[in-house]
Amino acid sequence: MKVSIIGLGYVGITTAAGLSEIGHEVIGYDIDKDRVKLLQDGKSPIYEPGLDELLRKNISEKRLTFTTSPEKAITHGDIIFICTGTPSREDGSADLTQVEGAAKTVARYINGFKLIVEKSTVPVKTAQWIERTMKLYLKKHIDFEVASNPEFLKEGDAINDFLKPDRIVIGVNSKRAEKMLRRLYKPIRSPIVVTDINTAEIIKHASNAFLAMKISFINMISDLCEATGADIELVAKAMGMDKRIGKQFLRAGVGYGGSCFPKDVKALYWVGKQYGLNFELLKNVHEINESRIDVLMKHLKNALWNLKDKSIAIWGLSFKPNTDDIREAPSIKVIKRILREGGRVTLYDPKAMENMRKIFPEGEAVKYAKDKYEAVKDAEALVILTEWDEFKDADLDKVKNAMLTPIIVDGRNIYRPRKVKRLGFEYYPMGRPS
Ligand SMILES: NC(=O)c1ccc[n+]([C@@H]2O[C@H](COP(=O)([O-])OP(=O)(O)OC[C@H]3O[C@@H](n4cnc5c(N)ncnc54)[C@H](O)[C@@H]3O)[C@@H](O)[C@H]2O)c1
């Protein structure tokens, strides 16, 4: 089938690569010309394991192209996916101007029937706004339909999630739209849930808010463990063994970040408010998450007393492992707090340093290390903020010898407390006896 993708971020690029991989003719379009140029050369502007290979393969097999021409993009596809961003406004509600922009582009260049599919995460009833925008800006009578097909991929494992999802959700208004989307996804052998459009939109928001709630819940219990000398890792392990609860997303730590959970929790809170519903639960989820930084900073100060002129190594800048994405990453808040108190940081991350340099350029108080061992040289504390495998496997003897004072503040609980203490470290995990 012929497919167009509007918006080439994490979701758009993965969707373009994934749909071409299963045999469709895909064209990707973005207003960011540099991004398109990179993609035309087969290079991904984001780090995602396996993505470069998939792009190159499908470009060379001529199923995948990228363009800066909106006309070329819109006229190509029978199905047009909107994959633009839906960031938070200052008040927490979803900013849908990119989605509106995409709809206007479709209205301007539409040349025949199109199924316009929102893949971006949007508040319920956004499809109605897309439809209204189309009608307002259409210059001639051309038939179109809007559908919802939310994306559930997780960064770091996006390709696998796209090609082997737990389920595919399709929100449609007609059999025609359902048939088109079923045909599109036929090569993917995952269950398909067909719903009306409002339901599909809510499924995505509710899924993300629920996962964020699980993380904040375990972090709330982590605070109780810390106050009473209990161990959150054992609490979470035993809780997770109950199949009704499940062990995933029960990791206590420095909290969730990224471009989805923080904004989607806030946006769904706003949706509830709009309908006069009590969604205060989500406000608490957000507030507990914000307070993780305070907990980590408390540990750091318990260890170092004052931060002024202290040298602190930070391992992990991306909001989670296997991605270079630093949007809403806890590291940004932690670095800001350390710098505000007069401390100096040496930063290391396997993939996210280039992005972080744009926020914290190298200078007197901010240094970037070429590897994890260089980062800890002469450091007075090591703060771990992302659970990359290479940190779990680090040679801790080497780390200890390089540091000025052997202190680890672990925001992700990646080590066994007894082991690190035996090696001679002072160890400050989250929600565990230290
Ligand atoms: N990142 C994830 O892990 C993830 C997972 C599932 C769902 N989502 C949702 O998918 C959506 C996209 O997320 P993302 O992380 O890929 O966003 P992103 O910000 O990385 O990418 C959005 C892209 O859209 C482009 N764009 C904006 N307006 C445009 C327009 N009018 N025409 C063409 N291009 C335009 C931007 O230049 C940018 O490249 C969001 O709603 C997000 O919540 C994201």
Image (tube, rainbow, N blue to C red):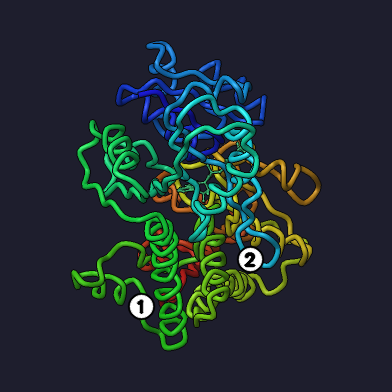
Q: 421 or 204, which is in the foreground?
A: 204
Residue that mark 2 sits on: 92
Residue 192 position within the rendered picture, expressed as x and y whole percent measured from the top left = 24, 47
Q: Residue furthest right?
A: 364
Confirm or deny contact between disc 1 and disc 2 (CB under 8 A): no
Residue depicted at x 39% and y 18%: 58
Amino acid type at mark 2: Gly
> Residue placed at 56% from the left, 64% from the top?
267
The image quarter containing residue 358 is: top right
- Look at mark 1 in the image and give the residue it sits on: 231
First in sequence: mark 1 vs mark 2? 2
Query: Mark 1: which amino acid?
Result: Asp
Checking the image for residue 268, the label placed there is none
- Camera sees residue 67: yes
Q: Tag 2's secondary structure?
A: loop
Disc 1 residue crowd, few under 14, some 14–19, many 20+, Cα 10 Å: some
Q: Residue drawn at (66%, 44%), measured in percent from left and top?
A: 356
Q: Quadrant of the N terminus?
A: top left
Horizontal and vertical percent position of residue 264: 52, 61
Position above or below: 399 against 134? below
Q: Quadrant of residue 140?
A: top right
In this rendering, position of residue 325 left or right of residue 232: right
Residue 384 visible here:
no
Query: Which quadrant of the frame does ligand 1 lie within?
Result: top right
